[in-house]
Image (tube, rainbow, N blue to C red):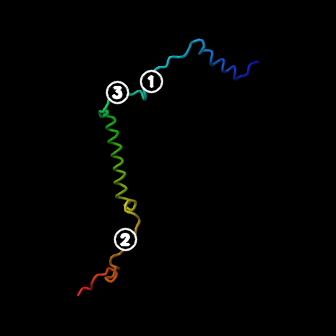
Amino acid sequence: LPSFRALGALLTGAPLLWHGPARITSRKANGGTHTEPQYRQYPQLTEKQKFESELISGVMWFWILWHCWHCPDALLGHLCWPDASEWMRSLLECPAVS
């Protein structure tokens, strides 16, 4: 009685022996349109690619400006600004006003 592994190998390998290797079909990635590479030239962008890039950059700038307006401490730091009214002329080394 053959083992299950040998039986499985026999069943899967038999069609390969009878019919030979299957022909490999060429496939295109994503099924969309593809542009041919061009040497030393800018890539040709589609309208969809232009729209998507503008949309992504618009969202990026909205996020940056929104957070600069609503959370300025994230950009400027969390420092306590000194109160200038508490400074004395002697600390600033200024001559007295006469």
Looking at the rendering, in which quadrant would you find the C terminus? bottom left
- In the rendered image, which quarter contains the N terminus? top right
Amino acid type, mark 3: Glu
Q: Which residue is mark 1?
A: 27
**Residue at 49%, 19% in the rendered image:** 24
Q: Is residue 77 above or below residue 64?
A: below
Looking at the picture, tell me which residue is in the foreground, 43 or 27: 43
Mark 3 or mark 1, whichever is nearer to me: 3
Label 2 element class: loop
Return the residue at label 2.
Answer: 81
Residue 29 vertical position relative to residue 11 in the rendered view, above or below? below
Query: Residue extending furthest front?
Result: 40
Q: How far separated are the C-alphas under marks 1 and 2?
A: 63 Å
Residue drawn at 30 percent across, 33 percent down: 40
Identified by mark 1, the residue type is Arg
Q: Which residue is mark 3?
A: 36
